[in-house]
Amino acid sequence: AGDLKAGPGRQNRFELESGEYRVTAAVGAAEKTAEVRIRADQRTERQIVLDAGILEVSVLLAEDGPEAPDARFQVLSVERDIRGERGQIKGPTRRSSFVLPAGAYVVRAESGQAGMDKEIHVSAGERNETTLVLDAGMLDITALLAEDGPEAPDARFQVLSVERDIRGERGQIKGPTRRSSFMLPAGAYVVRAESGQVAAEKDIEVYPGERSEPTLVLDAGVLHVRAVEVAGKPVTQRIRWTVFPVPEEGEPKPQAVTGPTSRNEFVLSQGEYIVQAEAGERNARKEVVIKSGERLDAEITVPDAADTELEP
């Protein structure tokens, strides 16, 4: 290969010494090289034919629309390598227009969890238009503490398969994530919402080109706790909180719902609980009642260091 005399660039006129050169023209993924002889004191014109066409890709959620939002595109080879994978020619990109050498390709479109491949042919000198239909819909999930609200704080969402594996577990399709909106292939799913120590699941259906908006009710409330000393002053020492359900009469001490933790706000299922505060060697407990959709601010008095600590 000889030395590079000019380019790459968009200019198409060059001043060169006499001699033989190779000129390469490229647009998009199309590229052609031609040999040119330059003679002294002469203007030489050379036309390079790319033998290429333009591919315009549209992607719809259903046959009658709408367009898929935030779609990503790839242009792949028809042939597969020894591992069964197609060669990547362009993308992934949000651009939907490509200049390609004439020939056969596979175009891939993806939006969220939905995607499809389609074999296409690009004809030289033509604009080739193709549409991919994802057969997908949008899922928007809302998680509430109670039937009439409010929304569950810091909710996390998952989309799961309806079928269970040999261990009885559902396949995880998306999440856990704080995002509550998902693009999914049409079909049946289980959606799960979690907030604090509470979770709820619901069977849902996603339809092509439609928006499904399920609401999950956690039947829970929010508990905010604060520790004070006997004199009413806030406890400056680091506090560790543990929350237990109130046991039924005669039952052994139940496992903690949450904690020990330095967090002092909890989302809990409706019911009765014991909250324990530990500040070094000092500790105290208090029974609280959590009601669905409500917030409870509870204050726990921690004894002075000289007082007898409560047994855990």
Image: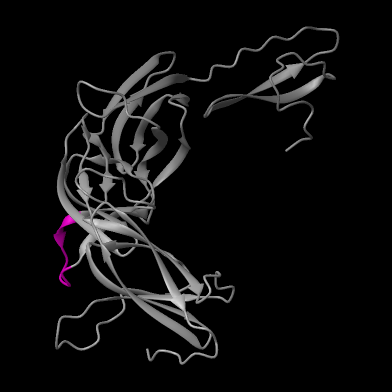
- Residue 262 in the image: above or below residue 180: below
Q: Residue at x 44, y 66 (%)?
A: 264
* Count of picture labels: 0
Q: Residue at x 41, y 22 (%)?
A: 55
| Snapshot quadrant of residue 125 | top left
- In the rendered image, residue 164, in percent from the top left (x then y), is placed at 15, 63
| Snapshot quadrant of residue 127 | top left
- Residue 141 in the image: above or below residue 298: above
Q: Is residue 249 left or right of residue 307?
A: left
Confirm whether the magenta stretch covers residue 71.
no
- For the N terminus, give its image quadrant: top right
Residue placed farthest to the front in the image? 231
Which residues are the magenta region? Answer: 161-168
Q: Residue at x 31, y 28 (%)?
A: 120
Q: Residue at x 34, y 37 (%)?
A: 111
Which one is in front, 306 or 288? 306
| Snapshot quadrant of residue 311 | bottom left
Which one is in front, 175 or 66? 175
- In the rendered image, residue 280, in percent from the top left (x then y), is placed at 53, 85
- In the rendered image, residue 30, in percent from the top left (x then y), is placed at 52, 26
- For the C terminus, give its image quadrant: bottom left
- In the rendered image, residue 243, in percent from the top left (x then y), is placed at 34, 74
Which one is in front, 3 or 237? 237
- Residue 102 in the image: above or below residue 199: above
Q: State the scheme by which the image is colored.
A: one colour
